[in-house]
Image (cartoon, rainbow, N blue to C red):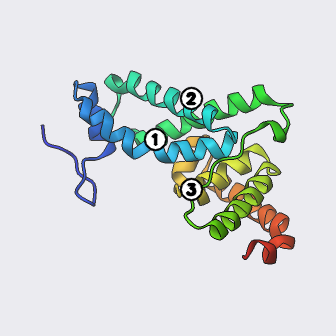
Amino acid sequence: MEMALDQAGEVTDDALLVLFANGDRSAAAELTARLAPRLLGYCNRMLRDLAEAEDVVQEAMLRLWKMAPDWQPGAAKPSTWVFRVASNLCTDRLRKKRGVGLDQIAEPADDAPGAEAAMMQAERVSALDAALQDLSERQRQAVVLRHIEGLSNPEIGEILEISVEAVESLTARGKRALAAALASRKEELGL
């Protein structure tokens, strides 16, 4: 079987999923290494609870492995598919958690090396997370997927099941709301 390679010369996500479906466990490990870190970052920002985010990533990846034998290469990207699943799982968990106070949600740990840099970065992350929580759920999803996870507008459209124009509108409104929310703290945050 000839391997499909991406522009960097690596085996594509599609090819890895097909290899896994055919019994290659190393393909699953490689695809997990590619997808899980970004997926965890997204889920952690959405849920603000690392343990919950890890559970969602695990569930989303399990669903990807279960449907691997039926995967149709080229129909969708595995990354887009698994982000859509994770997004839906996060939404389900957030709906169940309504009413939980922000004080009850654990703050994500910061791995920055220097103490001063760590404190400034933690303050920026905290300010951004707080501002993100004031956005509507859809705006928050679009902004996090676009500007934090680096996905393209068409990929976000697939994940959220909306048009590219709707993604652009959500991210633009979300960015304006974030800028307004953080404007008074620019100097304090070193922005």
Residue 52 position (above or below residue 165): above
Q: Label 2 sits on what residue type?
A: Asp
Q: Earlier in the sequence, mark 1 or mark 3?
A: 1
Q: CA distance from mark 1 to mark 3?
A: 18 Å
Question: In terms of depth relative to the viewer, which is nearer, 116 or 43?
Answer: 116
Q: CA distance from mark 2 to mark 3?
A: 21 Å
Q: Is 28 placed left or right of 164 in the picture?
A: left
Q: Nearer the viewer, mark 1 or mark 3?
A: 3
Q: Which residue is mark 1?
A: 36
Residue 173 position (above or below residue 18): below
Q: Are marks 2 and 3 in contact (CB under 8 Å)?
A: no
Q: Nearer the viewer, mark 2 or mark 3?
A: 3
Q: Which residue is mark 2?
A: 55
Residue 100 in view here: yes
Task: Give the structural element (helix, strand or loop) at label 1.
Answer: helix
Quarter of the rendering containing residue 146: bottom right
Q: Is 117 placed left or right of 189 in the picture?
A: left
Q: Which residue is mark 3?
A: 111
Q: Earlier in the sequence, mark 2 or mark 3?
A: 2
Question: In terms of depth relative to the viewer, which is nearer, 85 or 153?
Answer: 85
Residue at the front extreme?
115
* Residue 14 coordinates in the image, percent (x, y): 32, 40
| Label 2, residues with CA under 10 Å away: few <14, some 14-19, many ≥20 | some
Residue at 73%, 53% in the rendered image: 129
Residue at 79%, 53% in the rendered image: 130
Question: In terms of depth relative to the viewer, which is nearer, 43 or 146?
Answer: 43
Q: Label 1 sits on what residue type?
A: Ala
Quarter of the rendering containing residue 62: top left
* Residue 172 coordinates in the image, percent (x, y): 71, 63
Q: Label 3 sits on what residue type?
A: Asp
* Residue 84 coordinates in the image, percent (x, y): 55, 37
Q: Are marks 1 and 3 in contact (CB under 8 Å)?
A: no
